[in-house]
Image (cartoon, rainbow, N blue to C red):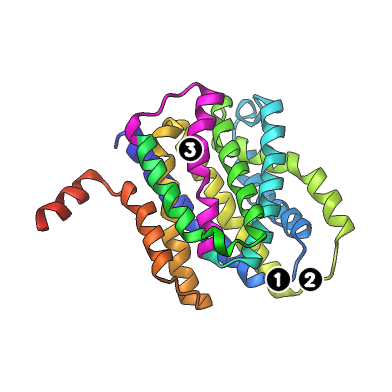
Amino acid sequence: MAPVNLAIVLLVLGNLLASLSDVAVKVLDGGVSPFQYIFLRQLVSLALLFPFWIRQPPTLRNLSNPKITVLRAHILLIGSCCMVVSITYLTLATANAVFYTAPLLMIPLSILLLNERPSAKKVLQTVIGFIGVLIILRPSQFHWAAIFALGTATTLALYNLLVRKIPNDQSVITTLFWTTCLSLPVAGGLAWFYWQPLSHNEVLWIALSAGFIISYNGLATMAYKKAPATQISLAEYSGLIFVVLFGVIWFDEVPDALTAAGIALIILPLMPKTWLKNLRGRR
Protein backbone atom coordinates (compact mmCIF):
# COMPACT_ATOMS: atom_id res chain seq x y z
CA MET A 1 0.00 0.00 0.00
CA ALA A 2 1.27 3.46 -0.91
CA PRO A 3 2.40 5.60 2.07
CA VAL A 4 -0.33 8.19 1.48
CA ASN A 5 -3.09 5.55 1.30
CA LEU A 6 -1.78 3.81 4.40
CA ALA A 7 -1.67 7.13 6.25
CA ILE A 8 -5.31 7.78 5.32
CA VAL A 9 -6.38 4.35 6.59
CA LEU A 10 -4.54 4.99 9.86
CA LEU A 11 -6.28 8.35 10.29
CA VAL A 12 -9.74 6.91 9.61
CA LEU A 13 -9.22 4.16 12.18
CA GLY A 14 -7.81 6.69 14.65
CA ASN A 15 -10.82 8.93 14.24
CA LEU A 16 -13.18 6.04 14.92
CA LEU A 17 -11.44 5.50 18.26
CA ALA A 18 -11.36 9.23 19.00
CA SER A 19 -15.12 9.33 18.40
CA LEU A 20 -15.60 6.61 21.00
CA SER A 21 -13.53 8.70 23.40
CA ASP A 22 -15.93 11.60 22.79
CA VAL A 23 -18.83 9.30 23.64
CA ALA A 24 -17.18 8.51 26.98
CA VAL A 25 -16.82 12.23 27.74
CA LYS A 26 -20.46 12.83 26.78
CA VAL A 27 -21.58 10.10 29.16
CA LEU A 28 -19.71 11.83 32.03
CA ASP A 29 -21.93 14.87 31.32
CA GLY A 30 -19.81 17.37 33.25
CA GLY A 31 -19.74 15.28 36.43
CA VAL A 32 -15.94 15.37 36.46
CA SER A 33 -13.94 18.60 36.21
CA PRO A 34 -11.92 18.95 32.97
CA PHE A 35 -8.61 19.16 34.88
CA GLN A 36 -9.37 16.06 36.91
CA TYR A 37 -10.46 14.20 33.80
CA ILE A 38 -7.30 15.16 31.90
CA PHE A 39 -4.96 14.17 34.73
CA LEU A 40 -6.59 10.76 35.22
CA ARG A 41 -6.76 10.14 31.49
CA GLN A 42 -3.05 10.96 31.09
CA LEU A 43 -2.20 8.78 34.07
CA VAL A 44 -4.08 5.81 32.59
CA SER A 45 -2.48 6.47 29.20
CA LEU A 46 0.99 6.42 30.76
CA ALA A 47 0.22 3.10 32.47
CA LEU A 48 -0.92 1.65 29.13
CA LEU A 49 2.16 2.91 27.31
CA PHE A 50 4.80 1.97 29.89
CA PRO A 51 4.94 -1.82 29.18
CA PHE A 52 5.49 -1.14 25.46
CA TRP A 53 8.01 1.62 26.11
CA ILE A 54 10.13 -0.36 28.59
CA ARG A 55 10.40 -3.36 26.24
CA GLN A 56 12.24 -1.26 23.68
CA PRO A 57 16.04 -1.20 23.56
CA PRO A 58 17.50 1.59 25.74
CA THR A 59 18.51 3.62 22.69
CA LEU A 60 14.90 3.69 21.45
CA ARG A 61 13.54 4.86 24.79
CA ASN A 62 15.47 8.13 24.70
CA LEU A 63 13.76 11.43 23.97
CA SER A 64 15.11 13.01 20.77
CA ASN A 65 13.59 16.49 20.76
CA PRO A 66 12.61 17.51 24.31
CA LYS A 67 11.59 21.09 23.47
CA ILE A 68 9.07 20.05 20.82
CA THR A 69 7.80 17.21 23.01
CA VAL A 70 7.23 19.53 25.98
CA LEU A 71 5.41 21.94 23.69
CA ARG A 72 3.21 19.17 22.25
CA ALA A 73 2.45 17.85 25.76
CA HIS A 74 1.05 21.16 26.93
CA ILE A 75 -0.75 21.85 23.66
CA LEU A 76 -2.45 18.50 24.27
CA LEU A 77 -3.52 19.60 27.76
CA ILE A 78 -5.07 22.83 26.51
CA GLY A 79 -6.90 21.08 23.69
CA SER A 80 -8.18 18.30 25.93
CA CYS A 81 -9.64 20.73 28.46
CA CYS A 82 -11.38 22.64 25.67
CA MET A 83 -12.69 19.35 24.28
CA VAL A 84 -14.32 18.31 27.58
CA VAL A 85 -16.14 21.64 27.91
CA SER A 86 -17.38 21.71 24.31
CA ILE A 87 -18.63 18.10 24.24
CA THR A 88 -20.43 18.61 27.55
CA TYR A 89 -22.46 21.58 26.30
CA LEU A 90 -22.80 20.88 22.56
CA THR A 91 -24.15 17.90 20.65
CA LEU A 92 -21.52 15.44 19.45
CA ALA A 93 -22.12 16.42 15.82
CA THR A 94 -21.85 20.17 16.47
CA ALA A 95 -18.77 19.91 18.68
CA ASN A 96 -16.99 17.64 16.25
CA ALA A 97 -17.94 19.80 13.28
CA VAL A 98 -15.86 22.53 14.91
CA PHE A 99 -13.13 20.04 15.88
CA TYR A 100 -12.83 19.13 12.23
CA THR A 101 -11.76 22.61 11.30
CA ALA A 102 -8.36 21.23 12.42
CA PRO A 103 -7.56 19.90 8.92
CA LEU A 104 -8.56 23.29 7.52
CA LEU A 105 -6.23 25.03 9.94
CA MET A 106 -3.48 22.57 9.08
CA ILE A 107 -3.28 23.87 5.51
CA PRO A 108 -2.03 27.38 6.41
CA LEU A 109 -0.12 26.07 9.44
CA SER A 110 1.72 23.50 7.31
CA ILE A 111 2.75 26.32 4.97
CA LEU A 112 4.03 28.45 7.86
CA LEU A 113 5.67 25.72 9.96
CA LEU A 114 6.71 23.05 7.44
CA ASN A 115 7.02 24.99 4.17
CA GLU A 116 4.60 22.61 2.45
CA ARG A 117 2.71 23.76 -0.64
CA PRO A 118 -0.81 22.35 -1.05
CA SER A 119 -2.25 21.91 -4.53
CA ALA A 120 -5.14 24.04 -5.79
CA LYS A 121 -7.35 20.96 -5.57
CA LYS A 122 -6.56 20.50 -1.86
CA VAL A 123 -7.33 24.15 -1.21
CA LEU A 124 -10.69 23.82 -3.02
CA GLN A 125 -11.57 20.67 -1.08
CA THR A 126 -10.71 22.47 2.15
CA VAL A 127 -12.91 25.44 1.28
CA ILE A 128 -15.85 23.12 0.50
CA GLY A 129 -15.35 21.33 3.81
CA PHE A 130 -15.20 24.62 5.68
CA ILE A 131 -18.51 25.71 4.13
CA GLY A 132 -19.99 22.45 5.41
CA VAL A 133 -18.72 23.20 8.91
CA LEU A 134 -20.30 26.67 8.83
CA ILE A 135 -23.64 25.21 7.76
CA ILE A 136 -23.56 22.75 10.65
CA LEU A 137 -22.50 25.36 13.19
CA ARG A 138 -24.97 28.00 11.98
CA PRO A 139 -23.58 31.30 13.34
CA SER A 140 -27.15 32.49 13.98
CA GLN A 141 -27.42 29.77 16.64
CA PHE A 142 -23.91 30.27 18.02
CA HIS A 143 -23.19 28.76 21.44
CA TRP A 144 -20.32 29.98 23.64
CA ALA A 145 -18.99 26.41 23.95
CA ALA A 146 -18.13 26.51 20.24
CA ILE A 147 -15.19 28.77 21.20
CA PHE A 148 -13.75 25.91 23.25
CA ALA A 149 -14.34 23.54 20.34
CA LEU A 150 -12.36 25.89 18.10
CA GLY A 151 -9.59 25.86 20.71
CA THR A 152 -9.53 22.08 20.46
CA ALA A 153 -9.27 22.26 16.67
CA THR A 154 -6.37 24.72 16.80
CA THR A 155 -4.39 22.70 19.32
CA LEU A 156 -5.06 19.47 17.43
CA ALA A 157 -3.73 20.99 14.22
CA LEU A 158 -0.57 22.19 15.97
CA TYR A 159 -0.13 18.88 17.80
CA ASN A 160 -0.25 16.88 14.59
CA LEU A 161 1.96 19.22 12.59
CA LEU A 162 4.68 19.46 15.24
CA VAL A 163 5.21 15.69 15.12
CA ARG A 164 7.01 16.32 11.82
CA LYS A 165 9.71 18.09 13.87
CA ILE A 166 10.43 14.84 15.74
CA PRO A 167 13.09 12.58 14.14
CA ASN A 168 11.68 9.64 12.19
CA ASP A 169 13.92 7.20 14.05
CA GLN A 170 12.06 7.92 17.31
CA SER A 171 9.38 5.25 17.76
CA VAL A 172 5.69 6.12 18.07
CA ILE A 173 5.59 4.52 21.53
CA THR A 174 8.48 6.66 22.74
CA THR A 175 6.89 9.81 21.32
CA LEU A 176 3.56 9.10 23.01
CA PHE A 177 5.16 8.00 26.28
CA TRP A 178 7.21 11.16 26.75
CA THR A 179 4.41 13.45 25.54
CA THR A 180 2.09 11.90 28.13
CA CYS A 181 4.70 11.85 30.89
CA LEU A 182 5.70 15.49 30.44
CA SER A 183 2.08 16.62 30.64
CA LEU A 184 1.50 15.09 34.08
CA PRO A 185 3.10 17.74 36.36
CA VAL A 186 0.90 20.57 35.12
CA ALA A 187 -2.16 18.32 34.75
CA GLY A 188 -1.68 16.98 38.29
CA GLY A 189 -1.29 20.44 39.79
CA LEU A 190 -4.49 21.70 38.16
CA ALA A 191 -6.41 18.55 39.10
CA TRP A 192 -5.38 18.92 42.75
CA PHE A 193 -7.18 22.28 42.99
CA TYR A 194 -10.38 20.88 41.49
CA TRP A 195 -10.35 17.37 42.95
CA GLN A 196 -13.67 15.75 43.85
CA PRO A 197 -14.79 12.19 44.70
CA LEU A 198 -15.40 9.87 41.75
CA SER A 199 -17.72 6.92 41.30
CA HIS A 200 -16.56 3.59 39.86
CA ASN A 201 -18.50 4.26 36.66
CA GLU A 202 -16.80 7.63 36.17
CA VAL A 203 -13.37 6.05 36.62
CA LEU A 204 -14.31 3.36 34.08
CA TRP A 205 -15.41 5.90 31.47
CA ILE A 206 -12.23 7.93 31.98
CA ALA A 207 -10.12 4.78 31.54
CA LEU A 208 -11.98 3.87 28.34
CA SER A 209 -11.55 7.39 27.02
CA ALA A 210 -7.82 7.21 27.77
CA GLY A 211 -7.44 3.94 25.88
CA PHE A 212 -9.31 5.26 22.85
CA ILE A 213 -7.53 8.61 22.68
CA ILE A 214 -4.03 7.19 23.17
CA SER A 215 -4.76 4.85 20.28
CA TYR A 216 -5.85 7.82 18.15
CA ASN A 217 -2.71 9.75 19.05
CA GLY A 218 -0.55 6.79 18.09
CA LEU A 219 -2.30 6.25 14.76
CA ALA A 220 -2.24 9.97 13.96
CA THR A 221 1.47 10.16 14.81
CA MET A 222 2.21 7.27 12.45
CA ALA A 223 0.02 8.78 9.73
CA TYR A 224 1.58 12.23 9.77
CA LYS A 225 5.07 10.74 9.74
CA LYS A 226 4.24 8.76 6.60
CA ALA A 227 2.79 11.54 4.46
CA PRO A 228 2.61 15.35 4.23
CA ALA A 229 -0.24 16.89 6.17
CA THR A 230 -1.64 18.59 3.06
CA GLN A 231 -2.20 15.19 1.40
CA ILE A 232 -3.96 13.37 4.23
CA SER A 233 -5.46 15.92 6.63
CA LEU A 234 -8.90 15.73 4.99
CA ALA A 235 -9.15 12.12 6.19
CA GLU A 236 -9.65 13.57 9.68
CA TYR A 237 -13.22 14.38 8.60
CA SER A 238 -14.12 10.68 8.66
CA GLY A 239 -14.65 10.96 12.41
CA LEU A 240 -17.60 13.25 11.78
CA ILE A 241 -19.52 10.33 10.30
CA PHE A 242 -18.83 8.25 13.38
CA VAL A 243 -19.90 10.88 15.92
CA VAL A 244 -23.13 11.58 14.05
CA LEU A 245 -23.98 7.87 14.12
CA PHE A 246 -23.06 7.57 17.80
CA GLY A 247 -25.07 10.69 18.63
CA VAL A 248 -28.16 9.22 16.98
CA ILE A 249 -27.74 5.77 18.51
CA TRP A 250 -26.81 6.65 22.09
CA PHE A 251 -27.94 10.24 22.73
CA ASP A 252 -30.92 10.70 20.39
CA GLU A 253 -29.13 13.61 18.68
CA VAL A 254 -30.74 13.33 15.26
CA PRO A 255 -29.22 15.85 12.80
CA ASP A 256 -31.62 18.06 10.86
CA ALA A 257 -31.57 18.73 7.11
CA LEU A 258 -29.06 21.59 7.31
CA THR A 259 -26.70 19.53 9.43
CA ALA A 260 -26.96 16.65 6.94
CA ALA A 261 -26.21 19.05 4.07
CA GLY A 262 -23.17 20.38 5.89
CA ILE A 263 -21.90 16.87 6.58
CA ALA A 264 -22.34 16.01 2.89
CA LEU A 265 -20.16 18.96 1.90
CA ILE A 266 -17.52 17.75 4.32
CA ILE A 267 -17.62 14.10 3.26
CA LEU A 268 -17.83 14.39 -0.55
CA PRO A 269 -14.27 15.75 -1.00
CA LEU A 270 -13.02 12.73 0.96
CA MET A 271 -14.57 10.14 -1.36
CA PRO A 272 -12.04 8.24 -3.48
CA LYS A 273 -11.99 9.17 -7.15
CA THR A 274 -13.19 5.70 -8.14
CA TRP A 275 -16.32 6.10 -5.98
CA LEU A 276 -17.13 9.46 -7.56
CA LYS A 277 -16.67 7.99 -11.06
CA ASN A 278 -19.02 5.12 -10.20
CA LEU A 279 -21.66 7.54 -8.92
CA ARG A 280 -21.42 9.61 -12.10
CA GLY A 281 -21.65 6.46 -14.23
CA ARG A 282 -24.84 5.34 -12.49
CA ARG A 283 -26.40 8.72 -13.00
Looking at the image, which is closer to me, 168 or 47?
A: 168
| Residue at x 51%, y 60% (from the top left corner) | 138
Q: Mark 3 points at which residue?
A: 222
Residue 198: quarter of image:
bottom right
Which quadrant is home to the C terminus? bottom left
84 to 176, vertically: above or below: below
Q: Check the image and report above or below for 67 versus 103.
A: above
Let me know if residue 169 appears in the view.
no
Q: Quick one: SS at disc 3?
A: helix
Q: Which numbered circle lies on residue 202?
A: 1
Q: Position of residue 48 (x, y in %)?
A: 63, 51
Q: Residue at x 68, y 53 (%)?
A: 82
The magenta stretch spans which residues?
A: 93-121
What crowding class fits label 2: few (fewer than 14 Cα within 10 Å), some (14-19), or many (20 or more)? Answer: few
The answer to whether residue 208 is left or right of residue 227 is right
Is label 2 in a helix, a strand or a loop? Answer: loop
**Main secondary structure found in the magenta portion:** helix
